[in-house]
Image (tube, helix red, strand yellow):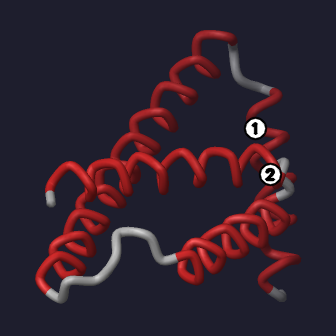
Amino acid sequence: MTENTADTADSVDSAESIQDMTLDELRAEIGDIDHELVELIARRTYVADAVAQVKAEKDLPTTDETQEERVMKRAGENADHFGVDSNLVKAIFRLLIEINKAEQRESR
């Protein structure tokens, strides 16, 4: 089975199992997902802080537009892959990037 076919099969299985869940179970599932999202944001922030340290040590500028474009392109591609609104995903990533840049500027 190809990756996309496997993803689609997983999505169908997930959709069927989600339809069988009660409201409380669905809310608990959202709670679990929210926890994972925060954990991933914390992990991303930790790595972004390490990037900021390297930039400061090498006297590199806070803003790297080429890298930001790569991140935004990748975010859009991932959104498309998972069938999520690309504009929403890109807005979230733009916010994460802007927060990281603000923190980098403050730490210099």
Residue at image mark 1: 17
SS under mark 2: helix
40 with respect to 66 (left or right) = left
In the rendered structure, find residue 7 and report the number of the disc placed on it: none
Figure label count:
2
Q: Examine the rendered structure and indicate whether residue 77 appears above or below residue 38.
A: below
User: Which residue is pictured at 86% across the width and 52% down the height?
Assistant: 12
Give me the residue at 71% from left, 23% from top: 21
Q: Is residue 39 left or right of residue 81?
A: left
The residue nearer to you, when weighing 57 against 21, is: 57
* Residue 13 numbered tag: 2
Q: Is residue 108 left or right of residue 10?
A: left
As displayed, is residue 32 above or below residue 3?
above
For marks 1 and 2, give the CA distance.
6 Å
Residue 96: give x, y in percent of width and height.
48, 50
In front here: 44 or 68? 68
Q: Residues within 10 Å of mark 1 (few under 14, many from 20)?
A: few
Which image quadrant: the C terminus? bottom left
Question: Residue 89 appears at what percent x and percent y?
Answer: 70, 50
Amino acid under disc 2:
Asp
Mark 1 residue element: helix
- Residue under the image location 48 percent in, 33 percent down: 34
- Residue 67 locus on image (x, y percent): 54, 80
Figure check: 32 above or below 45: above
Please say if the residues under marks 1 and 2 sit with CB atoms less than 8 Å apart: yes
Mark 2 crowdedness (10 Å alpha carbons): few <14, some 14-19, many ≥20: few
| Residue drawn at (16%, 73%) of the image | 53
Residue 79 drawn above or below residue 94: below
